[in-house]
Amino acid sequence: MACNNCGNCDCGGGGNCGDCNQTFPANCATGCRTPCSACPPNTADCETLPSALQNFVDAFFGSVTKTEIDGEVRWLLPCNLDIGLPGNPRADGEGLACYFLRLFRDGINGLEGPTGAAGAAGENGANAWTIILTAFVQPSPGGTVNFNIVPSPTITPGQTIFIPGSGYYMVTSRISNSVFAQLIESVPSPNAVTTPGTIALPCGPRGLTITGPTGAPGLQGPTGAQGNTGPTGAGGPTGPTGPAGSVATNSNGQVTITGATDMAVTNVDQKISFGIDDPEVTLPAVGTYFVLARFRCFNDVGSGNNLSRDFYLNNQTTATPVPGGEHPEVIMWNTGGSDHCNYVHIWAIVTTSNPNEIIDVHVTSDSAVAPQTIFQDGSSIMFIQLA
């Protein structure tokens, strides 16, 4: 059928109905050459190219919004076809045909549904340790022991286990709940017998202790400042026990010094002694006592010279100072024109471990300047048993 819809375009003469949708020779009218111009009239028998393209776009995509940016026409597709389905996004630069092919081939990922109800709680797992049910004697390193355990899947041959109070073992075999294990390394001072109820704890293999070579000695550093005076050393060993003394008739006692010689004090630690009578008491039985001593002291070195003396109660039997019996830096005043006399009281709570322990008093001055005197007259010591 001849196409008479191209107006003045004879298309070379005698063309068909599709000729209006072709690229015509240069002598054809421009109204029939491009999709932007329709070939009048447009009929169902001979639809123009612009009409056919528009119908295809509308049928395939729906309503398309077109924009022009810098001379470039862009289409905004309906139904979010530019983005794709939720959970199945369209890739950058992916054509619709490729996108549809991928969905048909790989399937559509569904959206995440609501959180389901919590499932039922599972069964409790097994403990990572077990309990030893039978006793065994501590072996030597490399020795093997046998003991029964509470059933547990954690104790298997080849497993290293730690047994508190005993050491590290390698499980060599297990028959039902009877375990044989070889001692790898014992703890310091292990128990002679491991008793039922002790735990057996699986653990990793013991690490190796590797001592590296001794490094070269460093340069000698400068001599440090002199340190503080160290504490008094421990007392010597207790001497042999003397003969038993007479049994005390009471729990109280007092020693008053009479007819003795006064004592000169120096800067050397010494027991207070008056020659014939000494200010010391014998505590008759094991117990707790209150001990009190009093001394009349004189500062004889001249006016304005105040001296400091350290007094302390001493357990002569154990050769140790009495805890709490230290009375340091007792000032012997001399501020006037003549020498001064001072009374000093020394006391402590004394607990004894043996009967007939002897308590005496020691003194040290901060000065060696003489004379410094403790008078025997007016000096005494007493005790009261509290418990």
Image: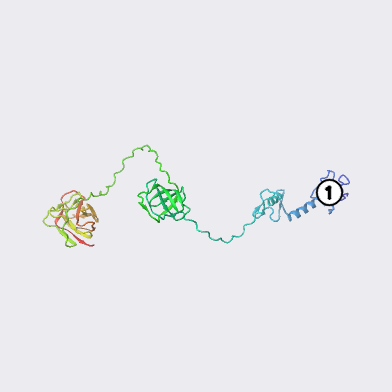
Residue under the image location 83 percent in, 48 percent down: 20
Judge left or right: residue 201 versus residue 257.
right
Q: Nearer the viewer, residue 337 or 155?
A: 155
Q: Nearer the viewer, residue 141 or 381?
A: 141
What is the crowding at mark 1: few (fewer than 14 residues within 10 Å), some, or many (at least 20)? some
Specify whether residue 338 is in view.
no
Q: Nearer the viewer, residue 317 or 90?
A: 317
Give the image location of residue 348, x and y in percent: 23, 58
Q: Nearer the viewer, residue 255 or 36?
A: 255
Residue furthest toward the left? 259
Give the image location of residue 365, x and y in percent: 20, 51
Circle 1 sits on which residue? 18
Give the image location of residue 284, x and y in percent: 19, 59
Specify whether residue 104 is in view.
yes
Judge left or right: residue 273 versus residue 174.
left
Residue furthest toward the front? 175
Which amino acid is tagged 1?
A: Gly
Q: Quadrant of the C terminus?
A: bottom left
Give the image location of residue 355, x and y in percent: 20, 57
